[in-house]
Image (cartoon, grey):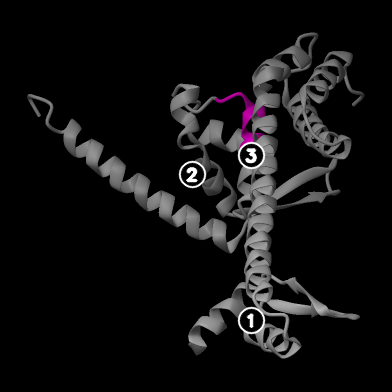
Amino acid sequence: MGGEALKGHLDLLLLTSIEAGARHGYAIAEELRSASFGAFDLPDGTIYPALHRLSEAGLLTSEWSEGGRRPRRLYTLTAKGRKALERQRTSWEDFERGVRGVLALRPGR
Amino acid sequence: MSEPQELSDYLADIAGALSGRRSYRQEIVAELRSHLLDGLDSAPAGAGAASSVIARFGPVEEIAHGFNALLRKRRLRVLRSVLAIALVSAAGGATVARSLGSNDDPRSFASFVGDHPSIEVIPGKPNAVTFVPKTHKVVSYFKRT
């Protein structure tokens, strides 16, 4: 999927990746790439401004973790972020259902 | 693992393209460095490892633009808040001036201050007031009436 198309859904993807627990940027980027079978291949660096934006909006909190090989900033979903994720997920599912319905109109099906 | 020069140069370019305070820029660069070194750890060893990690990370301009746009929005929000407070304070001050200007009677002054929860007498200056924008007080004032 092209970068521009993906950016419109980036918040939903980032929040979903962090939903299961605290993640750092590298793990999030790797997860998006592998879970989408390589279809979502944004430049890794572009997810950081988005993570900072979501933090400023109160949807994520972050803290530096000193464990492991090097310090990493870990992002966690807030209660507000969880609600935003639910809203965005429902909205996306409605949209997807609609598109699938229209695509089913293809002749011969 | 020591940091390859190519990677240090790339991070220096990003730092140079970022706006904002030095501590803010340093924290961003530290986070990006951590990512790039993780990428380098996972990349196949070889002469082109740093180049491929950098290529995957993206162009300096695109990354810096993302952060700088965020900073501009934050500054705009702060400016809007300051302007809103200044406007509310000015409106409150104008109300006080208009009401006090019509009557110099100290009893009316005390009565006026007592009737307006958002106005407080300045300590040590019994004839001077300050406007304190406290929304909940204004709301409770409207409820009483």
Is residue B53 covered in magenta?
no
Q: Find numbered disc 1 in the image and state the secondary structure of the residue it sits on.
A: loop
Chain letter of the residue beneath label 2 in the structure image: A
Which residue type does callout 1 highlight?
Answer: His
Is residue A26 shown to the viewer in this render? Answer: no
The residue beneath circle 1 is B116
Which residue of the protein is positioned furthest toward the left in this rendering?
A108
Magenta residues (range): A42-51
Q: Find numbered disc 3 in the image and state the secondary structure of the residue it sits on.
A: helix
Chain letter of the residue beneath label 3 in the structure image: B
Is residue A44 covered in magenta?
yes
> Residue at (15%, 33%) from the top-left corner?
A104
Q: What distance separates the C-alpha of mark 1 from that of mark 3?
A: 36 Å
Q: Find numbered disc 2 in the image and state the secondary structure of the residue it sits on.
A: helix
> Residue at (70%, 41%) from the top-left corner?
B75
Residue B78 or residue B111, whichever sits in front? B111
Quadrant of the frame with the N terminus of chain B: top right
Q: Is residue B125 above or below residue A83?
A: below
